[in-house]
Amino acid sequence: MIIHDERVAIPFEEYGIKIPQSDRGSMVLQALRQNKDLANHEEQWRYTGPLPLIGPADLERVHNHEYVRALFEDPEPAMLTTYELLDKNGNYHRYDPADAARPLAELSGRAQANAAGTCLAAERALDNGFCFFLGGGMHHATAEGGRGFCPVNDMVVAVRRLQAAGRIARAWIVDVDAHKGDGTAALCLDDPDTSTLSIHMARGWPLDRPSRNADGCLHPSFIPSTVDIPIEQGGEAHYLPALAHGLELLLSIDGRRPPDLAVVVDGSDAYEHDELPSASRLRLSRDQMLQRDLLVYEFLTTLDVPQAWVMAGGYGPRCAEVYVQFLETILARRLG
Ligand SMILES: [Zn+2]
């Protein structure tokens, strides 16, 4: 089952923001519709109903009250911070209001739609075993607020919403985006019911800073996931074996008890053709990207764990290829 929503697909250029992220979700959906084996069965693989309503109570299970209130009442300052649109002198950086067709504050609604899509994907995964949301994956957001282009942590919102509803007890968040899932790790550090795995670039953003702040506290980017797998530059050949080992380790740490749900943060910025400079230290080939996704999918399928997948990072026009090749493979299998 695939979920696509127009609100999460609005390009950043319409907000006057220069982040090279195209409308990936629509590109993926269009490519799937052009697949002759899928084109005639769209009603079997595409969800076309509404997204659930996400309110402050859903977000406050994850983010602090002041930040959630700002998101609903006065989001523009939070968006300037989250999307890093001010330089250290307070001048606009990669943002020009004169180029904007939409107000910056509208990005809060876009973030809520992303969270709603991930919540729905998690619900559908429980019903059907697998669901992919063409959005979401905002893994850098912490309890205090948004950062790194991530206004809310939609994965943790979805997990805690289902836990609050009594539909699941334990969850995994498996993050294969090129950047460390640091916000997710920080949010789940003291959560015994949510285990996290992150495989990511060993250096560069968000790890290119001292690990401790001036007050001696650990910076959020250095808070450990349950399993962290840092990959050094040039280490692409080790990536797939390291991921396979990491997944086994996660299962072992959890006492070999599979969770009730896994959310997979399927960033495509580890692809060699991704265009974001801060993701350039990891350059997996197209086939390695497919093997990566199938490794996670098959590991979870073997354990009979319902899996909700979200897009996360992916920059430039070629990132859609990564999702298309995976979804064509999976949908062909699942639809028989
Ligand atoms: Zn990323």
Image (cartoon, rainbow, N blue to C red):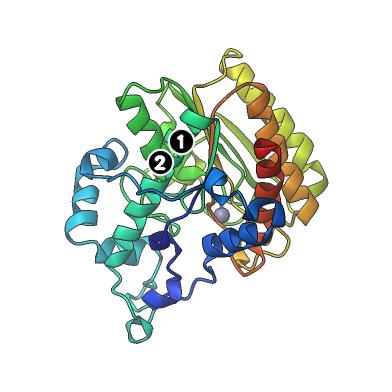
Mark 2 element type: helix
The residue that label 2 is drawn on is 120
Residue visible at 35% across and 25% down?
163
Can see residue 124? yes
Please tell me whether residue 54 is drawn above or below residue 5 in the rendered image: above
**Residue 124's spot in the image, x, y percent?**
46, 35
Instruction: Tell which quarter ligand 1 is in.
Output: bottom right
Q: What residue is rendered at 65% in x and 43% in y?
A: 331
As rendered, which of 273 and 6 lies closer to the eye? 6
**In which quadrant of the rendered image does the C terminus lie?**
top right
Q: Residue at x 38, y 85 (%)?
A: 99
Q: Nearer the viewer, residue 257 or 209?
A: 257
Q: Amino acid at mark 2?
A: Leu
Instruction: Name the disc covering residue 156, or none.
Output: none
Query: Which of the 4 quarters of the picture holds residue 83?
Result: bottom left
| Residue that mark 1 sits on | 124
Mark 1 and mark 2 in contact? Answer it, CB < 8 Å. Answer: yes
Amino acid identity at mark 1: Arg
The image shows residue 267, relative to residue 321, as above or below, that is above
Q: Position of residue 115 (x, y in %)?
A: 37, 47
Give the image location of residue 165, x and y in percent. 30, 26
- Name the residue at the right extreme: 237
Quadrant position of residue 56: top left
Instruction: Judge from the rendering whether residue 249 lies leftward or rightward of residue 312; answer left or right.
Output: right
